[in-house]
Each structure stands twice: as structure tokens, then as C-alpha cells.
Amino acid sequence: MFYFTLAVFASVACFGLGIISYRRHSIFEILLTSKPQNKKDIIKELYRITNRLLIAVGINLNMEEIDFKLKLAGRPYNLQAIDFVGIMAAFVGLVLVSALSLCLGGVIDPWIVMLFTFAAVVAPWAKIKADAERGRESFREDLINLSRRMEIAATGGLMPVRVLEWSAEGETLLARELKNVIDQVRLGKPLHFVFSNMAARYNLAEADELALVLKHAEKGSAIANYLRDLNRTFRNRKELELFTKASKLKPKVTVYLVLSAILTTVCFVVMPIILETIKIYNS
């Protein structure tokens, strides 16, 4: 217990002395007293140095990929890629120091320190990846709904650009992307070309197929029938995906039921017999 208390006290004391020292004369002081632009420059410089060290040990941070994941995840707390990496590094350091303190105090084993550190590294990134996947699926659903609205509008004789302008009103990821699409179209870029670029960024077949329909519209073709066929394809694809998920889910449920039955049998049938046998043997 003495070593545990000493380790915790040493960690807290070092942390406090570090803040006092850096606050008086260091980059930390500049971060607290400089203008926002200078702070960003310092953070970028610190990131550049950290990234070089990570590359030297075989870890390469793809900031564009991280920023894209954060964008799909809805930009939690307005985090940029650099902010996320910095917070993640600080969190891992905090967990590591706390776990080492507990280990030096004899409270936990060394392998638990490695387990905690691994969890601290994996958990934030896994959370962002899961949120990004949900965001991508939500983006895809919004895109399919946009195609349905475009079909209704095309049947009524409205131009696709008008539907895009209406759909750009909102705070969803698709709405923000459509605002960018409309701005580029106003600058003279072809609508189908901008949509194709969006499809490439998000790796969505639906956006690519919709871009092909918009290309027909730019040539003056009536696209109501094209959109009707496309939406039918989307529905069939969705039904197939649901069927595939249900097919994969059934074996998992069966396995869980079998494991539950085995566990119940062991706990309520086998274990009482074993305990009774041990009791008789000891007596």
C-alpha cells in the first residue's frame, strides 16, 4: 500500500511540476497566451514532430482518412483530425500513467497495464469507425430518398437541380454535400461530373448510378423512366441486403441458443452432481 501511495503521489507531483514549469517558460505558455492562429501553427508543428516519431517506429497516421471518418461520424465536438489524434494521445498517456501507478502499487499485474493501454488505443478509434459506418449508411439512405423525390419531381416536369436545392436545406451530411454540389454547378461544372466525384469520395454505387441518370438529364432526355427503374433497383438491392443479413443472423442466434442451453445444463444439472460427489468423497 505504501508503494501504491508513493507511486500515485509521484505521478500527481510530476504532473503538477510539469504544468508549472511549462507554464512559466515553454510551448505550453505560448499555447495559453498566443492568438488562435499561432496555437494552430504550434499544434501542427507538434503533430509534425509526433508523426515523424510514429513513422520511425512503424506507425503511419493518415490524417485525411481520420478526418473523413470524423466527417462521416458527424464531426463529434467539431473535432478535426489533429484534435482527435492529440486527445487520443493524451487519453492513452493518462491511462498508461494511471495503470503503471496501480501496477507499481501492486494493485494490478503488468499484463493488465498492457491490456488497459491497448484498450485505450483501440476504443476511441473503434468508436469513430462505428459512428462513421452508421453515418455512411445514413448518407446512403438519404441518397436513395433523394432519388425517389427526384422521380416524383421529374414526373411533374421539374428540373433535377430544383430538387437538389430543396434537399440542400438541412444539416445532414447529404444536405451539406448537396450545397457544395450546387455551388460547383453554379460555377459551371456539369452536374453529373460533380455527382460522380461525390460517389468516388464516399464509395457509393447509388451516387454513381444517380450521376448517370443526371447525365441523361443534361442531354435533354426525360429521366422519369430512368429514375423509376433506378429506384426499383434500389428497392430490390435493399431487400436482398435485408435477406442476406437475416440469413447471417439465423446461425448466430442458433449458436447463442445452443451455448445458453449448454451453460444452463452445466449450472443446474452437472454442477450440483459434481458438488455432491465431492462432498461425499470428502466425508
Image (tube, grey):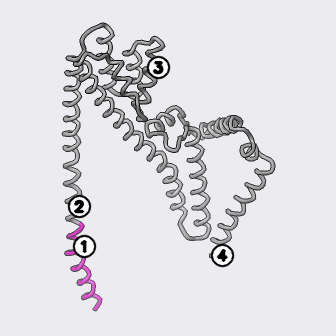
Disc 3 or 1, which lies upstream in sequence?
Answer: 3
Task: Indicate which disc residue 160 carries.
Answer: none
CA separation, marks 4 and 1?
A: 42 Å
Mark 4 falls on what kind of element?
helix
Residue 77 in the image: x percent, y percent?
52, 44
| Quadrant in the picture for the N terminus | bottom right
Relative placement, left or right, of 138 versus 129 is left
Task: Indicate which disc residue 267 carries.
Answer: 1
Residue at mark 3: 183
Residue at mark 2: 259
Disc 4 or 1, which lies upstream in sequence?
Answer: 4
For marks 3 and 1, give the one nearer the viewer: 3
Q: Which residues are magenta?
A: 263-283
Residue at 20% from the left image edge and 35% from the top image edge: 240
Quadrant hosting residue 279: bottom left
Residue at mark 4: 2
Whether 171 is drawn above or below 216: the answer is below
Mark 2 falls on what kind of element?
helix
Residue at 72% from the left image edge and 38% from the top image edge: 35
For marks 3 and 2, give the one nearer the viewer: 3
Residue 229 in the image: x percent, y percent?
19, 21
Residue at 27% from the left image edge and 84% from the top image edge: 278
Residue 156 is one of the magenta-drawn residues = no
Disc 3 or 2, which lies upstream in sequence?
Answer: 3
Q: Are marks 4 and 3 in contact (CB under 8 Å)?
A: no
CA separation, marks 2 and 1?
A: 12 Å
Determine the main secondary structure of the stretch shown in magenta: helix
- Which residue type carries mark 2? Leu
CA separation, marks 4 and 3?
A: 66 Å
- Mark 1 burial class by Cα count in 10 Å: few <14, some 14-19, many 20+: few
